Amino acid sequence: MRGYFKRKEHEVPELNTSSLPDLIFTVLFFFMIVTHMRDVDLKVKYQVPQGNEVEKVEHKSSVTYIYIGRSKTPDAKDGQTFYIQLNNKLATLDDIQTFIEKEKESMSEEDRARMTVSIKADKDVPMGIIADVKERLQQSFALKINYSATEK
Amino acid sequence: MFERRRKKVPGLNTTSTADISFMLLIFFLVTSSMDTDKGLPRQLPPPQQEQQKEVELKVKERNVMEIRIDADNQLTCNGEPTTPEALKERIADFVANTANDPTLPEKSIREVNYFGRCEVSDRHVLSIQVDRQTSYDAYFQMQDAIVGAYKQLRNQLALRKFGKPLSRCTRDEREAIGMVYPQRISEEAPTATEGDADQKGGKKS
């Protein structure tokens, strides 16, 4: 009888960590899907304006970016101050239409319907350039645009 | 005799898998851009056909508000110099025209969801004219003021009618409010002041 109540010496069982990798992999995959990698290296410097009424841009996969700003490498051989960047290279106004068409093609049906072009332009860019860009966008029927800005 | 001996497969040591995947996780956290793009969403009109260009819409003078920004970034509204903050108030008064002032835009009676027959401010036009030399910042501040003015009006209406701010209205309610205060903005091609305007406008290359 006495022996029955005697405390058994029991060891603390080791924590089973075999499922830990699976857990972390799940988190990893979640982040891989949710975030999108920054796939452009900027060749222009720009500082977007500040506004009061800015909204978040939804549906990242349907957003195309056009950067307009000063060149990072000062090579003022053609006297231009502001440059347009599409994807990874500096471009001219005439490249915009083909660029938009290509972007449209690579999008899914759903994204194409709500395609938005986000113009990330420097504060000091003259409106002439912006107006020209907008005209090209109109011609390629990319009518939803977004003036990128930060909150005041 | 040829019976295979039962060998025990040793268990793979997976204690470091967690560390490896942690490293991957941290790598993705660092490299991925979590920054959310913010901005002012706008809708462009479809491209104009040549024939349509000639058909100029005649708009009564009382319905038009002329907003200009000149090459020196001076904002003017109907010829008077103003600031974006003042412009916002002016646009709100102009579009709402609460007292039915004969110098402010006309309204028309329309059938709108939730509201029934009501006065709708769908005749007004904000005419925007900028110069090629106008800075983007000045233009943006003006656009911001315009959006702010409409938002203020719509929000007021939402509070009055539905008792909640616009952001909490359903899609149908928002559409109805958008019918009462539609955005009617006409943007003209920017004017060029000097000879170098074209070159700076990037047309050259």
Image: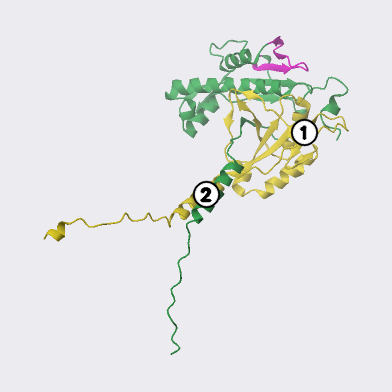
Amino acid residing under circle 1? Lys
Q: Residues within 10 Å of mark 2 (few under 14, many from 20)?
A: some
In terms of image quadrants, where is residue A8? Answer: bottom left
Q: Colour of chain A?
A: yellow
Disc 1: which residue:
A72
Query: Toward the viewer: A66 or A109?
Result: A66
Label 2: which secondary element: helix
Query: Toward the viewer: A3 or B124?
Result: A3
Amino acid residing under circle 2? Phe
Task: Classify residue A133 as left or right of residue A112.
Answer: right
Is residue B69 located in the magenta-colored stretch of the structure?
A: yes
Disc 2: which residue:
B22
Residue A79 place in picture, x, y as percent:
87, 29
Tell me the residue at 45%/83% (across/down): B4
Q: Which chain is green?
A: B
Q: Chain of mark 2?
A: B
In terms of image quadrants, where is residue A92? Answer: top right
Is residue B110 located in the magenta-colored stretch of the structure?
A: no
